Amino acid sequence: MHCFDCSKEGTETPAVAVCVDCGAGVCPRHLISEPEPVRQSTSPGRVWSAGESRRMICLVCHRSLQ
């Protein structure tokens, strides 16, 4: 898979991730990796943090969410 944004610029760059919002293949130049808190529910009304995960998002979606 190639980076969607690079292909619009006329180049073929291998994608290293898929955007969680739009599903486009993304290269390192067009990628934002953000921490994503992981929460789990143990019983109704009780939530505990299980650490952090990663959220891979393209620059276009990242700009639209700000």
Image (cartoon, grey):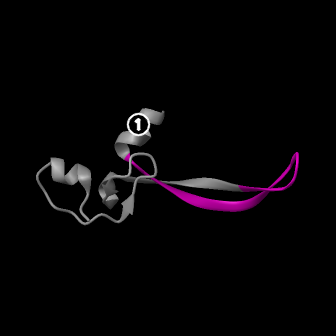
17 in the magenta segment:
no
Question: Which portion, as a residue range, is magenta?
Answer: 39-58
Residue name at image x 26 percent, y 65 percent: 1
Residue that badge 1 annotates: 63
Residue most extreme to the front: 44
| Other residues around mark 1 within 10 Å, as few (<14) / some (14–19) / many (≥20) | few
- Which quarter of the picture shows residue 3? bottom left
Q: Position of residue 34 (x, y in %)?
A: 52, 53
Chief SS of the magenta region: strand
Amino acid type at mark 1: Arg
Q: Position of residue 48 (x, y in %)?
A: 82, 55
In this picture, residue 47 sits left or right of residue 22: right
Residue name at image x 60 percent, y 61 percent: 53
Residue name at image x 11 percent, y 52 percent: 10
Position of residue 51 relative to residue 5, above or below, is below
Q: Position of residue 18 (x, y in %)?
A: 39, 58
